[in-house]
Amino acid sequence: MASETEEIPKGPTARLALQLALAALVIITGSLNNIFKQVASATLCNYTYMLQLTTAVVFVPVYCGAAWYYLRKGWVPTEQINFIWEMNGSHGTPVLALYLAAALGDAVGDSIGMICTPYVAGPIHSLLSNFTPIWIAVLAFAFLGKRYSLLQCVGMLAVLVAAGVGVTPTLEEGDSSGTSPYFAIVLVVSCIFNAISWLIKEHVFARYEGWKSSRGIDDSRSMHIFLVQAHLAVFALPLTLLCVPLNQGLGQMHGESIVSYLSEGDR
């Protein structure tokens, strides 16, 4: 019934149009996000971490509100809540613990990425951020035994080559190019944390399918993204706040205490 399920376009043409529209939306919003981050970082300088903290604060009501709306509409089955909050560990590590680990990965990766923003030129920052899927593939191959097709390997190699071609001349120029080689390397390494978070979330999505089968639940719907992100957002907020010492490690606090750094950055 229309009141119980989301309206999904029927037919190949409508679905293709929806996919193209969503792809365009992702590209546009992603580009605008990078532009706004670069503009803000030029003003905030060594206080860009505050942007990430603000983002973490905003995500909580946004994702929790969206999850509540979908639950209220009946578009998210209550079984998904039971799956997330099941604490007996009969299927391994409790899902809440996995979401906590995923939120920690995103909090650390995103915080470091935001701290690096003023020291890495916009186009270079965008190129280096593409290392996240590379790390995902490497970690999935090394620890999960996942295999990739030749076409997928060629695609990842193309991303790696494009990033290398675009970044190498800038790094050779050093700080004079507007990009610090040190922070560029830190940015690449920070993508590992986001990759780990992505793999954990993929594991939970796959586990949910097995959980449904073991309980005889006849529902073709996978874990709802807003429900997942709502839990991650709640965990990520305090974890992002705990990432403040990263500013000290990356030389952003210049002898300030954590309290004074946060107070100054909040002005």
Image (cartoon, grey):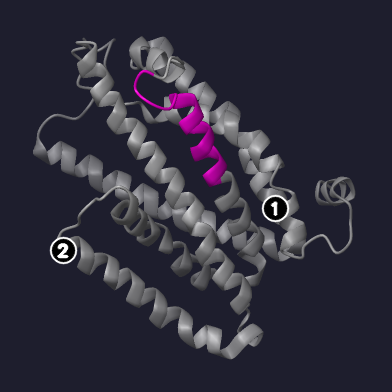
Q: Residues within 10 Å of mark 1 (few under 14, many from 20)?
A: many
Disc 1: which residue: 49
Q: Would residue 239 be seen by someone viewing this image from the given angle?
A: yes
Q: Amino acid at mark 1?
A: Tyr
Above-or-below relation of 113 to 67: below
Is 93 part of what is drawn in magenta? yes
Q: Which region is colored magenta? A: 90-106
Closer to viewer: mark 2 or mark 1: 2
Among numbered discs 2 and 1, the one appearing first in the sequence: 1
- In this view, 166 is above or below 81: below
- The disc labelled 2 sits on which kind of residue? Leu
Category of crowding for the residue at label 2, using alpha-carbon neighbours closer than 10 angstroms: few (below 14), some (14–19), many (at least 20):
few
Give 209 or 39, whichever is nearer the viewer.
209
Quadrant of residue 251 in the image? bottom right
- Look at 53% across and 33% down and name the residue there: 100
Task: For the N terminus, give its image quadrant.
Answer: top left
Residue linked to disc 2: 151
Residue 86 sits in which quadrant? top left
